[in-house]
Amino acid sequence: MNKQHVQELILKEHYGLLTAEEREELDMLLEYYEEVREMRGEIRREVPADEALGAMRLFNLEQGYENILLARAAWLAGQRRKWFLRSATAIVAVSVGLLFFMLNRSMEPQSYTAVPAPDAVVLKLAGGRTLTLGDSGLQQISLKGTVLSNHNRQLSFTGGGGKEGAGWNTLSVPAGKNYEIELTDGTSVWLNSASKIRFPFSFEAGVRRVYVEGEAYFKVAPDVNRPFIVHSGVTVVKVLGTEFNINAYLPGKIVTSLVKGKVTVHAEGEQTVLEPGREAVTRTGSPITVREMNPELLGWREGIYYFEHASVPEIAAVVQRCFNVKIVIDSRRAREQTFRGKLYRSQGLQAFMNQLTTTGRISFYWENGTLHCR
C-alpha cells in the first residue's frame, strides 16, 4: 500500500476533489485497512480546512515541481518550533499544497483502468496450503480429516477438515468465471466472478457464519437451532433458511436482495427485516435504505448481466469480471455516457462491444492486448 497515494486520496476527499473512480478506491481501502481509517480520522481531527487551504496559498502554482519541493522544505523549516505540538497537521497541510499543485498541473482527465485478475479458482486452506481447482471433470483432494470434491466448478466436502482444515478457508473466484460451493450444512452458495467466500469446514454448534466479498447467491439450508450469518463489509445478514443475493462489489456499498423467506440486515447499529422482492442497501456511514428488487439483476447465475442507466466505468467493471480483460477509458466524454441493456456472457465480448458501438456514442479498439473505449 502506497501511503503517499492513500494520503492524497484522503485529502482530496477532505476537500471534495475525489473523482468517482478515486471514491471507489478510497472506499475499498477504508473497508479493508484499519491503518487507512486511522489516517483519515487523524486528518479530520487535526487539519481544519481553512488551515490546510492557507498552506496551499504559500505556493506559487506557476513554479516548477522542483521549486515547489524547495518551498515545501522552507515552510517546514519555519515550523520546527511547533513541530512537537502539531507535526501531523504540518505534514498534512503542506501535502495539500503539493496536491493542489499536482491537481492543477493538468486538467486532462486520467484514464480509468480495469486490471485483469488471475484466471484460476483457488482454495486457500486455514493452514496456509493453496489448492488450484479445475474447471471441468472430477477432482478429489484428500486432507487429514476431510475429502474435497471439485466437479465441474462445484465444490463439496465431507468430514470436518481435521487439523489441516481447522479454521477459516478462503475460496477465490477470478474474473471470467463463476463457481458453486456446497457447505457442510447443505447450504449452496453461487459465487460471481471476482468474488470470495471465507468459510469453515465445520460450523460451530450454535451458529453458521461465513464472510463474502464480491457477489454471491445463497440458498440456505433450514436449521432453527443454528442461524446462518453472512458478513460483508459493515453489513451482517442473519437468516434461518432462505434464498438471497449479496452484491458487495462496490466498496462501501452492499446490496442484499431477498428472493424467498425472510432475512434481517444489520449495519452500523441499525437493522431492518426484508420481505421477498425487496432489497436493503447499506453504505458506510449512512442509514439502511430499502427498495424494490429488480429480479433481472440476479441473472448473473445464468450469465446475463442487466444494465439500467449504467455509466461506462460501471459497465467496464462488469466486463472485466466477465471476460478478464484490461480496459482503459480514454476520454471524459466516453466515461460520462450511460446505457441500458443486457450482456450475455455466452455470446462473447465482441458481440457486446458491437451492441454498444451501434449507438454511435462510444467506440472500441485494441492496443497491446488492452481494450480501449473512446
Image (spheres, grey):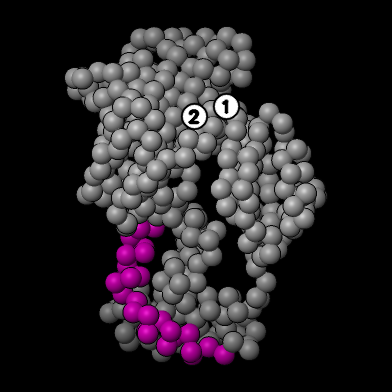
- Please tell me how crowded label 1 is: few (under 14), some (14-19), or many (20+) other residues with Cα within 10 Å: few
Residue 314 placement (x, y as % from top left): 58, 50
- Tell me if 97 is positioned left or right of 331 in this view: left
| Residue positioned 55% across, 32% down in the render | 300
Residue 92 placement (x, y as % from top left): 41, 75
Locate residue 238: give its quadrant.
top left
Judging by the rendered image, the residue that carries numbered circle 1 is 302
Residue 105 placement (x, y as % from top left): 64, 78
Which range is magenta? 36-60
Residue 304 placement (x, y as % from top left): 60, 33
113 lies above or below 159: below
SS for callout 2: strand
Main SS of the magenta part reads helix
| Residue positioned 34% across, 30% down in the render | 210
- Tell me if 331 is positioned left or right of 274 in this view: right
| Residue positioned 35% across, 9% down in the render | 159
- Tell me if 355 is positioned left or right of 313 in this view: right
- In the image, 94 versus 177, the foreground residue is 177
The image's mark for residue 191 is 2
Marks 2 and 1 close (CB-CB < 8 Å): no
- Say what amino acid the circle numbered 2 marks: Leu
97 lies above or below 206: below
Residue 320 appears in view: no
